Image (cartoon, grey):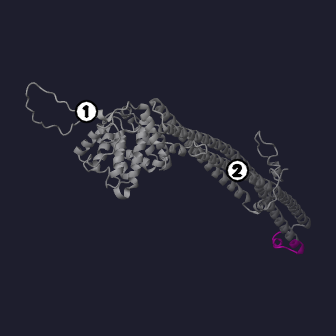
Amino acid sequence: MMGSDGSLSLSEITVPLTPSETPTKIANTPSEPDELLEKWRNLDNGLPCLLEKTRQDISVTKEALNFFKKRAAIEEEYGRQLTKLSQSMMEGHDRQQLFSDTLTQSWTNILKVHETIGEQRLKFGSEIAEIAEDISFLIKDIDKKRKMTKDLSARHERVLVDAELALSKAKQRYDISSEEWETKLMQLKTEAGGMSLKGMFKPNRNQAQLNKYEDEARSKAAAADEQYKQQLSYANSLRKDYFEEHLPKMLSTLKGTDNEICVALRYQLARYAYSFEQMMAANGNELDNEQDSGLRTTITRIDKDADLRNYVDTHGGRFISSQIRELKYEKYEMAVKVEEPQPVAAFAKSISTAKSRTVFGIDLQQLLDQEGSEVPMILRICTQTIEAYGLHNQGIYRLSGAASHIRKVKSLIEQSNSVFLLTPEDYSGDINSVTGALKLWFRELPDPLIPRRVSDQFIAAAKCEDERVRVISLHTAINELPDANYATLRYLANHLDKIQQHEVYNKMGTPNLAIIFGPTLMGGDKDSYTFDESKTLQDMQWHVRVIETILENYRVIFEPDEE
């Protein structure tokens, strides 16, 4: 049905359907004459209110999806690492071919328990991943249904608005025509009663002309009145169809959509709870069970006395008499008399020196390959020492230690083959000597920690005025760093984050740290000028801004595990 002004009828609106849906999915949804639907139908914003409620439930479901994805990844990684650790430990234990006793048997059983727990956690992670996948499909389906209802509502409302606009125009034409008719009637009455003001200057129009004008005005007003009544009837018909048929159907459909996501999410949460309980129960069964094969029972079976007795019985030698245990002194009789030599002084102790290794001034990847680690030992030694003794030290990293003290720290680190904690005696009681050695190591890298070849990419990111775009750009640039540079930068950023958390004591906030480490990490120190010095000076401020942005958004960029 078309309106009198050619507008589209509500009844002609259809919903676009997917191949999997039947043509009557929305049109034939039964009305739900419950109190809640009736209340929504009578509200001026009932449909928008329900649309917002559905959007909110979708948002919560998306949060649940994000949680389950991350939880699945955590559980799977934990399960893999625990299983791998247990298996590698058992392989190493088997290679030793140790004597079998209660201790070795219990230790083997403990490793098997942990391997089983790891497998259970892997299974739990897989189940959570399946839940996340189901929730992802649910969100897509519900979002699609909500959008369909929202689009349908917008189309109905456009039809109503068009009809009301056409009604307003018809009413305006009706008012104008009626006013013109009223004017003609008044002229006719005035002319019939006598001479008008115009009659004093020119002859009056005859009665036939007046009657003709009045008839034309009457017909025009009647036509406008009829058109106005038709448009009013059409508009009321559309409103009646909308409020009594279409709106209840859309509300009922939307309520069903919202119910679907709530019920489905509750079901997935129940699945998660059940899987969680099953996993915890299985883990608990590995710790203690009725078959006495749990961790607790395994530990209680360790019998040190029996192990020692069995070991001696198996590996002990022959029994000897107590009389032959003591050895006698037998002096050598010399034919020539010799005077006893006077005792000579001996060294109090022997000094052994470890072979030094090269730490300063070599390529980062070469150093890591030499050490066989992901993060340089010098970085771990210095940062752990600073965190142990220097977090409250005012001006930490800003103040420099004595050159002789820094050389001492440098020598100790180059002679070490493992990570250790420097003592106050090692750095002569000045923690700034440790920070000086660490900054010296960064400055002497052949290529800065943030390599020169990607320096322009970092500077371009720092120049972004929009903070969000700047953080995203830096995040992308950091992720593209070589593994050695990324791991080292991440470890250093974690350390500097701890420094700025104690700013109230050390007076070293993010801006101060950025001023120090911007040139150091991006090759801006004067000792590293190996190319265009003027360009380096111009880029100095952007180096500082790069490091400041990284430290301010450390948890966004590196996503550290919460401690």
Q: In whole angstroms, how far apart are the C-alphas of marks 1 and 2? A: 90 Å
Q: Is any atom of residue 130 visible in this view?
A: yes
Residue to which mark 2 is pinned: 261
Given the image, on which type of amino acid does mark 2 rest? Ile
Residue situated in front as seen by the camera: 485 or 380 = 380
Front-most of residues 255 and 342: 342
Q: Earlier in the sequence, mark 1 or mark 2?
A: 2
Q: Position of residue 351 (x, y in %)?
A: 22, 37
Dividing the picture into quadrants, the one containing residue 119 is top right
The reply to whether the magenta stretch includes residue 59 is: no
Q: Nearer the viewer, residue 208 or 367?
A: 367
Magenta region, residue range: 189-202
Residue 35 location (% of width, % of height): 79, 62
Of discs 1 and 2, which sits in the foreground? 1
Residue 136 appears left or right of 478: right
Q: Amino acid at mark 1?
A: Leu
Q: Is residue 507 left or right of residue 54?
A: left
Helix, strand or loop for disc 2? helix
Residue for point 40% across, 36% down:
373
Residue 466 appears anywhere in the view: no
Residue 383 coordinates in the image, percent (x, y): 36, 46
Image quarter of residue 524: top left
Q: Which residue is mark 1?
A: 327
Where residue 62 sits: x, y (%)?
63, 48
